[in-house]
Image (tube, rainbow, N blue to C red):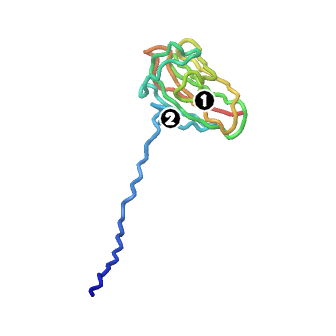
Amino acid sequence: TTTPSTTSMNVTSTTRSTTTTTTPTGQSCALPRPLSIGTTANGDTGTGIDHGPGVGCMQNAQAPDLVYVVTPATDGTLTLSLTSDWDGGIYVRTTCDDPQTELACEDVLGENATEVLQLPVTGGTTYYVYVDGYTTESYGSYTLDSDLQ
């Protein structure tokens, strides 16, 4: 009688781990720029795309815009100040790609204005801040200041 031989074989495979880092561009809800409260963010909406109009004061906006994401650590009043030399505006949503979740909008008509938006916020809740232009010619560099009181 012949006994079959058994062979044990261990296979080890090694794969290389690759990490890809994607810089948040603010051009989409998938890659919003992080907004750190208490800092100044500089940007240029000329690098953005038009996400469509808001539902508040920027409902006619057809200019390129950029999206920021912020999650305050505590409850309070979030103050956002947008300064630009073009006719800009800011609005805030709780769901990035849903205009019906827009909570507040601020637009001082005309160029060379500072838009100041104040909004009561809940700590731990994520908010999306849009920097937008009022007309198709309204875009360019800006500063966005934020504070929580």
Structural distance between the alpha carbons of marks 1 and 2:
13 Å
Residue, disc 1:
94
**Quadrant hosting residue 3:** bottom left
Which residue, as the protein is rendered here, is positioned at the far bottom? 1
- Numbered disc total: 2
Q: Say which of marks 1 and 2 sits in front.
A: 1
Q: Position of residue 87 (x, y in %)?
A: 51, 16
Label of residue 32 in the image: 2
The spot of residue 121 in percent (x, y) is 69, 31
Eyeballing the image, is 22 above or below 53?
below
Q: Do the CB atoms of the residues marked 1 and 2 lie less than 8 Å apart?
A: no
* Quadrant of res 35: top right
Image quadrant holding the N terminus, namely: bottom left
Q: Secondary structure at mark 2?
A: loop
**Mark 1 packing: few (<14 Cα in 10 Å), some, or many (20+)?**
some
Crowding at dot 2, Cα within 10 Å, few <14 / some 14-19 / many 20+, comes out as many
* Three-letter amino acid code at the position of disc 2: Pro
Relative image position of residue 107 (x, y in whole percent): 58, 16
Task: Give the residue type at disc 1.
Answer: Thr
Q: Which structural element holds mark 1?
A: loop
Nearer to the camera, 129 or 40: 129
- The disc placed on residue 135 is none
Quadrant location, the C terminus: top right
Furthest-front residue in view?
Answer: 1
Q: Residue at x 45, y 35 (%)?
A: 25
Which of these two is toward me, 119 or 139?
Answer: 119
Give 89 or 128, whichever is nearer the viewer.
128
Residue 101, percent across and down? 60, 24
In the rendered image, the vertical position of residue 136 relative to residue 38, given as above or below? above
Going from N to C along the chain, the mark reached first, 1 or 2, is 2
